[in-house]
Amino acid sequence: MGIISIQNNSGIPKYRQIITSVEQAIETNVLIKGDQLPSINTIRKEFSLSRDTVLLAFNELKLRGIVESVAGKGYYVKSTKTKTKQKVFLLFDELNAFKENLYHSFITNLDSNIDVDIYFHHFNIDVFESLIKNNAGNYNYYIIMPANLENAHFAIDKLPKDKVIILDQTNPNLINYTSIYQNFERDIYNSLTEVLSKIITYNKLVLVFKEDKQPLGMLNGFQNFCSEFNLKSEVILRMRNRTIHKGDIYLVPDDRSLILAIKKIKSSKLTLGKDIGIISYNETLLKEIVADGITTISTDFNYMGKRLAEIITQKETIKIENPTSIIIRNSI
């Protein structure tokens, strides 16, 4: 056949090898504009592949505008520009300051021949499923932030596995996908342990936790920490109706609750960092300044965005636990 080359033990998906073979044939002028590609059945029989594998390769080449299909005849070279733009589907749960940092880092480090369309599911499983269903087959890569949506894997599993990258939160149902994620359970335990000497100067450690939005691992890590060190603790749903008390230290994952907590502390005339403490989740520039500095537990969102771009451009199949650290400021 000559044009298509498949190596069984290379570790590279067979459909990806078909794409690379066609690209190389075009770049070396073995194939020129208007030439017909080997048929799906010819490739399938030659390399003992499924029809779906060959069709997946041809569809991606078609999506990129490199080949076109002619009904009843087959596939033909439409363009010799193999470096045509690729399209990335990016599905966030919501947009906030630290997600903006992640997005900016990702875009900055991407190749110029890659376009990104960003969507948001706002923790709504129906929106999540609809966005994936309506965009299946339209993109070269799908970067998906499933958050803690129950059964999100059913929608994700309908996409080609090697085109999907799971971002930020993962779970056992998504273990076979490329991912860059946070280990919330271990990160929160280790971070709180690092500042244990400060935490024990307070009477009670309080976690503000909304189970529909916050990772379950965060709650597990918090409970493990409090149990390990025999600390008085409490988990509450929101700050709005909370009466704050001297001696409390709050762990606040979302910025709305952080603002409410700071307002309540100011109105109560308690001194932050002395009478009452706050540890926030997710670092932003504003937290360096607000209330003389808020202590934060945060993953490195700039690194996450940079590494995500590298996964796309280098076509990596990998699972990466993104680093997390605690930044100690005057709020504890």
Image (cartoon, rainbow, N blue to C red):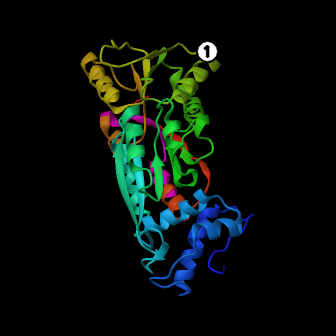
Q: Which residue is mark 1?
A: 230
Location of residue 299 with respect to 56 vertically, above or below: above
Apparent side of residue 214 relative to residue 217 in the rendered image (left or right): left
Q: Residue furthest front?
A: 72
Q: Nearer the viewer, residue 168 or 76?
A: 76
**Residue closest to the eye, 79 or 139:** 79
Residue 142 lies in the magenta stretch: no
Q: Looking at this view, is 185 or 143 the one in front?
A: 143
303 is within the stretch colored magenta: yes
Instruction: State whether residue 22 is above or below residue 126.
Output: below
Image location (x, y in percent) of residue 175: 62, 41
| Above or below, 100 relative to 17 | above
Magenta residues (range): 291-307
Picture residue at 35% right of the left edge, 54% below the top:
117
Tell me which residue sits at (51%, 60%) in the image: 312
Residue visible at 47% across and 50% down in the picture: 143
Name of the residue lying farthest toward the left: 267
Q: On the picture, is 41 further left or further right than 98?
A: right
Indicate the amino acid at tag 1: Asn
Task: Indicate the quadrant containing the C terminus: top left, top right, bottom left or bottom right.
Answer: top left
> 94 or 124, which is in the foreground?
124
The image position of residue 171, as x and y in percent, is 58, 35
* Residue 27, horizontal then vertical, whole percent: 52, 83
Q: Secondary structure at mark 1?
A: loop
Can residue 303 be seen here? The reply is yes
- Asked where in the image residue 80 lies, by quadrant, the reply is bottom left
